[in-house]
């Protein structure tokens, strides 16, 4: 039931970011265009996530009461864990899509390897968090999502830096120097 209430919004946004940001980011020609697109998408998705999270937080108790009629209770800590996990999934989709669009083959291989390491950490963290029930398991898995997103974002940032201008004229290319 928690997945149906809290998970659906985040899953749809995760898929949407994954499918729409990548081709649009690949189609950009300049660093400025990349930056604008990422900022625009971050604001748009961030706003939807914020509004959706607030709605999930406040609508879960009435929906729970209506559909579960006291048979099962979704504690606030569990709903919060689902929201935090959903946000981490979207951040991962955002970072992964951006990395896929701008990173080189070596960087993508490292992102992939670090992703598998994050899966291992998530499994260990989920088992460790199990002593606090489903809430602890969700936070353990969330740690994995975060650890998967951070390296991808780290490889994206250098591709978003504007070139530094020294005030000196550009050096001529080697082909012009050999003439």
Image (cartoon, grey):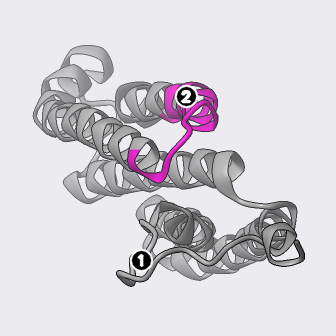
Does 176 appear above or below 26? below
- Tell me the number on the disc at residue 24: 2
Could you tell me how far apart the alpha carbons at marks 2 and 1 are, in whole angstroms?
Answer: 25 Å
Residue 57 at what x, y percent from top left? 17, 40
Q: Is residue 31 magenta?
A: yes
Q: Nearer the viewer, mark 2 or mark 1?
A: 1
Residue 124 at what x, y percent from top left? 69, 80
CA neighbours of label 2 inside 10 A, class few (<14), some (14 to 19), many (20+): some
Tell me the magenta residue range.
Answer: 14-32
Left or right relative to 58: residue 47: right
Residue that appears at 69% across and 79% down: 121
Does 168 appear above or below 46? below
The image quadrant of residue 154 is bottom right
The mark that comes first in sequence, 2 or 1, is: 2
Quarter of the image with the N terminus in it? top left
Q: Main secondary structure of the magenta part?
A: helix
The image quadrant of residue 140 is bottom right
Q: Which residue is mark 1?
A: 164
Quarter of the image with the C terminus in it? bottom right
Does 19 appear above or below 100? above
């Amino acid at each position: 039931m928690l997945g149906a209430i809290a998970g659906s919004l985040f899953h749809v946004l995760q898929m949407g970011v994954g499918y729409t940001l990548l081709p649009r980011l690949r189609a950009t020609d300049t660093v400025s265009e990349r930056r604008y697109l990422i900022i625009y998408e971050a604001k748009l998705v961030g706003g939807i996530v914020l509004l959706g999270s607030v709605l999930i937080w406040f609508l879960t108790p009435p929906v729970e009461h209506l559909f579960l009629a006291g048979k099962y209770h979704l504690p606030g800590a569990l709903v919060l864990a689902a929201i935090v996990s959903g946000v981490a999934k979207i951040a991962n989709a955002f970072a992964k899509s951006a990395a896929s669009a701008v990173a080189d083959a070596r960087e993508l291989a490292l992102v992939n390897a670090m992703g598998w390491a994050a899966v291992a950490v998530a499994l260990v963290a989920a088992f460790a968090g199990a002593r606090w029930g489903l809430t602890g398991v969700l936070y353990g898995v969330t740690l994995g999502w975060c650890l998967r997103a951070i390296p991808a974002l780290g490889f994206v940032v250098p591709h978003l830096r504007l070139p530094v201008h020294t005030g000196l004229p550009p050096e001529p290319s080697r082909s012009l120097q050999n003439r």
